[in-house]
Image (tube, rainbow, N blue to C red):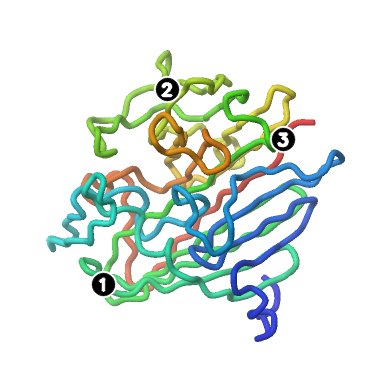
């Protein structure tokens, strides 16, 4: 975990923290504890594995940010928990929903730091429609196997609390255009969404459909803003998803069983949502639950007072 930082080293991380290890380099923004950059340094030089943004500016399309205490959208900002109605602030004004929780626009505390890892923490206090105090932490660590991100959440209040978490991570393969890449997802079902990006029916099998990425598929012309589930988990308890360039190099994102959902989103100028400097870009977002889970109950977590939850995901460079 590293030693607690001195005041001098804390000052040095006013905008972000850089860590290095195992041939990888990562930059973590203090605001949102966001993964601002991940690179693998191979024999041909550094290769970008994620999209990035300038420190001090708002991450485009929530790139790299942690989404808690719920990911995605809550319909009309309204939900009922333990028989009590809650009305959250509407933050997704385009579709009239409460979106992505409370922690992505706030500064996180640097708890500890070493050359190859950093731990950050934030307290979720009381908000409009949210009477549930929580403590959320994240640790970014680099080794030869790549990046491992460990999330925890603890109910610091006196009553049970609903909870969900996601990561708005973008992946890339160096400077290769997205439309020249192929995508493989270890996902057996997808959840259809309506025009408000909210669930519109039950999960559907992807086999034989336009949403079947169980074998690598070219991304040219593909549009995605889709929650996937029924993730195929390997014997080590991880699901794996890959973006590959034509030469076989790629970026692999994995997630532990605690993340039973993966939202795939393509930023696209045709939809009025380009990624600055890149145009089309791919987000692969590990999530514990689908959109509007606080109303549907699907994979909604409930933390008892004092209870702690933890989950992991990560990225690694693959190919020659």
* Dot in front, 1 or 3: 3
Circle 2 sits in a helix, a strand or a loop, which is it? loop
Which quadrant of the view contains residue 26? Answer: bottom right
Circle 1 sits in a helix, a strand or a loop, which is it? loop
Circle 3 sits in a helix, a strand or a loop, which is it? strand
The residue at the point 56 percent across, 58 percent down is 150
Q: Please state if 58 lies on the left or on the right of 178 as rendered.
A: left
Instruction: Give the Cα separation between the discs numbered 1 and 3.
Output: 45 Å
Instruction: Give the Cα separation between the discs numbered 2 and 3.
Output: 24 Å
* Dot in front, 1 or 2: 2
On screen, 207 above or below 60?
Answer: above
Residue position marked by numbered label 3 in the rendering: 318
Mark 1 or mark 3, which has the lower sequence index?
A: 1
Residue position marked by numbered label 2 in the rendering: 211
Question: Who is closer to the viewer here, 45 or 257?
Answer: 45
On screen, 239 above or below 136?
Answer: above
Q: Are marks 1 and 2 in contact (CB under 8 Å)?
A: no
Instruction: Give the Cα separation between the discs numbered 1 and 2.
Output: 40 Å
Q: Please state if 201 lies on the left or on the right of 240 as rendered.
A: left
Which percent across, then down, holds residue 87?
17, 61
Residue position marked by numbered label 1 in the rendering: 159
On screen, 215 above or below 132?
Answer: above
Which percent across, then down, holds residue 210?
41, 18
Question: Who is closer to the viewer here, 285 or 205?
Answer: 285
Q: Which quadrant is home to the N terminus?
A: bottom right
The residue at the point 24 percent across, 32 percent down is 194
Q: Are marks 1 and 3 in contact (CB under 8 Å)?
A: no
């Amino acid at each position: 975990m590293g030693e607690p930082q001195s005041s001098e080293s804390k000052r040095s991380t006013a905008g972000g923290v850089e860590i290095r290890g195992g041939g990888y380099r990562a930059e973590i923004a203090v605001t949102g504890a966001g993964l601002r950059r991940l690179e693998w340094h191979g024999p041909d030089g550094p290769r970008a594995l994620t999209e990035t943004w300038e420190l001090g500016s708002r991450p485009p399309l929530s790139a790299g940010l942690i989404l808690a205490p719920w990911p995605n959208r809550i319909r009309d900002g309204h939900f009922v928990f333990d028989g009590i109605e809650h009305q959250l602030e509407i933050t997704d004004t385009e579709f009239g929903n409460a979106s992505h929780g409370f922690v992505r626009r706030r500064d996180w505390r640097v708890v500890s730091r070493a050359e190859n890892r950093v731990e950050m923490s934030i307290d979720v206090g009381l908000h409009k429609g949210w009477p549930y105090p929580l403590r959320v932490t994240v640790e970014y660590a680099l080794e030869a196997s790549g990046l491992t991100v460990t999330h925890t959440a603890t109910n610091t209040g006196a009553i049970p609390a609903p909870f969900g978490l996601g990561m708005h991570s973008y992946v890339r393969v160096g400077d290769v255009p997205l439309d020249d890449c192929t995508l493989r997802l270890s996902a057996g079902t997808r959840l259809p969404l309506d025009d408000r990006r909210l669930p519109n029916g039950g999960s559907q099998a992807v086999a034989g459909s336009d949403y079947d990425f169980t074998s690598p598929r070219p991304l040219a012309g593909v549009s995605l803003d889709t929650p996937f589930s029924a993730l195929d988990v390997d014997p080590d308890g991880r699901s794996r998803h890959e973006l590959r360039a034509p030469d076989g190099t790629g970026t692999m994102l994995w997630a532990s069983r605690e993340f039973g959902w993966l939202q795939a989103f393509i930023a696209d100028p045709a939809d009025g949502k380009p990624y600055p400097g890149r145009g089309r870009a791919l987000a692969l977002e590990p999530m514990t639950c689908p959109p509007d889970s606080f109303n549907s109950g699907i994979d909604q977590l409930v933390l008892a007072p004092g209870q702690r939850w933890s989950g992991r995901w990560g990225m690694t460079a693959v190919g020659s």
